[in-house]
Image (tube, helix red, strand yellow):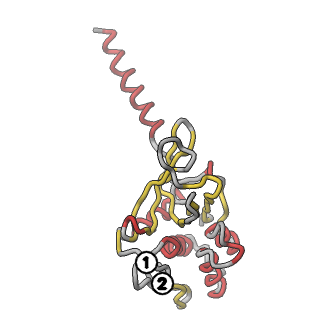
Amino acid sequence: MRAMRWLLPLAAIAAIAIGLLLIPPRARAEDKDALAAAAAFPDGGGYDSTWKGTGSPEDVVFQGTTILAKGKNGTYCSGFTFAVAMRVAERRKLLAKCTVAQIRQFQREWFGATKSSKEKQCVVAAESLGIGAERPLKDAQPGDFVQLWRANGTGHSVVGLRWISKDGRLIALEYRSSQGSTGGVGDRIEYFTDVPGMNGTIRRDRTYVCRLHPK
């Protein structure tokens, strides 16, 4: 009976330890506002598959000037993440010294509409404006913005929610963005192409992580 008294606490401790190993990385305190901003936009709302509208879930206004009007035919990925990024940057007071012209350029680069930003998009946009920087994939955290490219050549702009690892190796990303499969805004999980047996779609060598500066 005395032995059993010890076994139960040890079993409980072991269970707790295993559980802790399975918990995904938590968002840094300064990145929780990015997760909150992404979650503030409701699921759905329609997906603009034409990509001819702004793709934004709301009017994005800076210093009284409309940078992007709310999308009339729903949202798409770049419009959604840009709206989230603007909310976060405004809250952190990262845009205090910016001009309207600079924010317009920031939006174009975020959408990959310039020659220099076509590949890394959000990374180039944030670094050019001086409000963020690229982070190595191995250091990615929830609340980071991500530009990913798939094996089929399509790209996606997302807010990282959870970085999923197995045996110490990153295997998948859970993100929030706007896509056809969720009828607009929603959460999805995609695996990397080099993960056996998971029919992964994301190219690890073309996944770019952007983290906005803290306040």
Crowdedness near tag 1: few (<14), some (14–19) or many (≥20) residues, C-alpha within 10 Å: many
Using the image as rendered, state which of residue 56 and residue 39 is in the foreground.
56
Q: How many marks?
A: 2
In the depicted structure, whether residue 28 falls above or below residue 20: below
Crowdedness near tag 2: few (<14), some (14–19) or many (≥20) residues, C-alpha within 10 Å: some
Outermost residue on the front side: it is 152
Outermost residue on the bottom side: it is 64
Q: Are marks 1 and 2 in contact (CB under 8 Å)?
A: yes
Could you say where residue 51 lies in the image, as x and y percent from the top left?
Answer: 49, 79
The residue under label 2 is which amino acid type?
A: Gly
The residue under label 1 is which amino acid type?
A: Asp
Tell me which residue sits at (59%, 55%) in the image: 203
Tell me which residue sits at (57%, 41%) in the image: 169
In the depicted structure, whether residue 5 falls above or below residue 54: above
Could you say where residue 35 lies in the image, as x and y percent from the top left?
Answer: 46, 62
State which tag comes first along the sequence, 1 or 2: 1
Left or right: 167 with respect to 109? left
* SS at mark 2 in the image: loop
In the depicted structure, whether residue 188 falls above or below residue 23: below
Separation (CA) of disc 1 from disc 2: 7 Å
The quarter of the rendered structure image containing the C terminus is bottom right
The quarter of the rendered structure image containing the N terminus is top left
* SS at mark 1 in the image: loop
Outermost residue on the left side: it is 1
- Tag on residue 53? 2
Tell me which residue sits at (55%, 50%) in the image: 193
Q: Find disc 1 in the rendering and name its residue.
A: 48
